[in-house]
Image (cartoon, grey):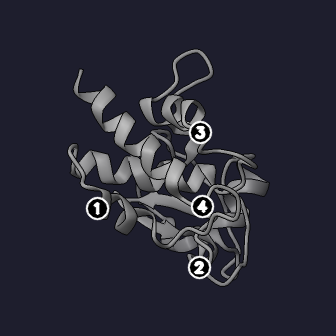
Amino acid sequence: MNGKDHALLVESHERLLDVLRDRLELKGTKEGCSTGDCGICAILMDGKLVNSCLILAIQARNKNITTIEAVGTAENLHPLQRQFINSNACQCGFCTPAMILASKNLLDHNPNPTEEDIKEAIRGILCRCTGYHSIIKAVKAAALESKK
């Protein structure tokens, strides 16, 4: 979990989302629809974006999990975090952790994405505030910043 091993006893029915938020106190991962439709609970599991509301905690055993808490710090923002702020891409902030993780996953695999690549990377995450234009702008700016 974010580069650290955790040993937890989990119930067979516990969702990864609940373990992250309630047991590990990683509140950056949000709960939206609980059915995998909104993408708000997205995390990276072994380098793949997944909805943590659809993953049983036991399925995360021996997996490399990355949540928003592992992306930058208040003192040292990740380029995506900085550009989301600069581009006003995090209005209410509810979808922001998932958007940043989806965008990070994209830039980790494709440091020079097209607008279509960005749209594809974030397509499973609903945002009700920004209309996506500012999010796409932020991802483009972060890609350029990362090249410097």
The residues tagged by marks 4 and 1 sit, at their Cα atoms, a distance apart of 17 Å
Q: Secondary structure at mark 4?
A: loop
**Residue farthest to the right, as pictured:** 22
Mark 3 neighbour class, 10 Å CA radius: few under 14, some 14 to 19, many 20 or more: few
Give the camera-side residue of 76 and 25: 76
The residues tagged by marks 4 and 3 sit, at their Cα atoms, a distance apart of 25 Å
Determine which of the numbered discs, if any, sits on residue 117 in the image: 1
* 49 relative to 75, above or below: below
| Residue 125 in the image, given as x and y percentages of width and height | 55, 68
Give the camera-side residue of 3 and 32: 32
Q: Secondary structure at mark 3?
A: helix
The answer to whether residue 66 is seen in the rendering is no
Left or right, 85 with reference to 4: right
| Residue 55 in the image, given as x and y percentages of width and height | 56, 76
The residues tagged by marks 3 and 2 sit, at their Cα atoms, a distance apart of 20 Å
4 and 2 marks in contact (CB < 8 Å): no
Return the disc, 4 or 3, that comes first in the chain's sequence: 3
Q: Quadrant of residue 40?
A: bottom right
Determine which of the numbered discs, if any, sits on residue 69 in the image: 3
| Residue 41 in the image, given as x and y percentages of width and height | 62, 64
**Closer to the eye: label 3 or 1:** 1
Kindly identify the residue that appears in the image at 52 percent across and 28 percent down: 82
Determine which of the numbered discs, if any, sits on residue 131 in the image: 4
Kindly identify the residue that appears in the image at 56 percent across and 56 percent down: 98
Kind of residue at disc 1: Asp
The answer to whether residue 78 is seen in the rendering is yes
1 and 2 marks in contact (CB < 8 Å): no
Kind of residue at disc 2: Leu
Query: In the rendered image, which residue does mark 2 sit on?
Result: 54
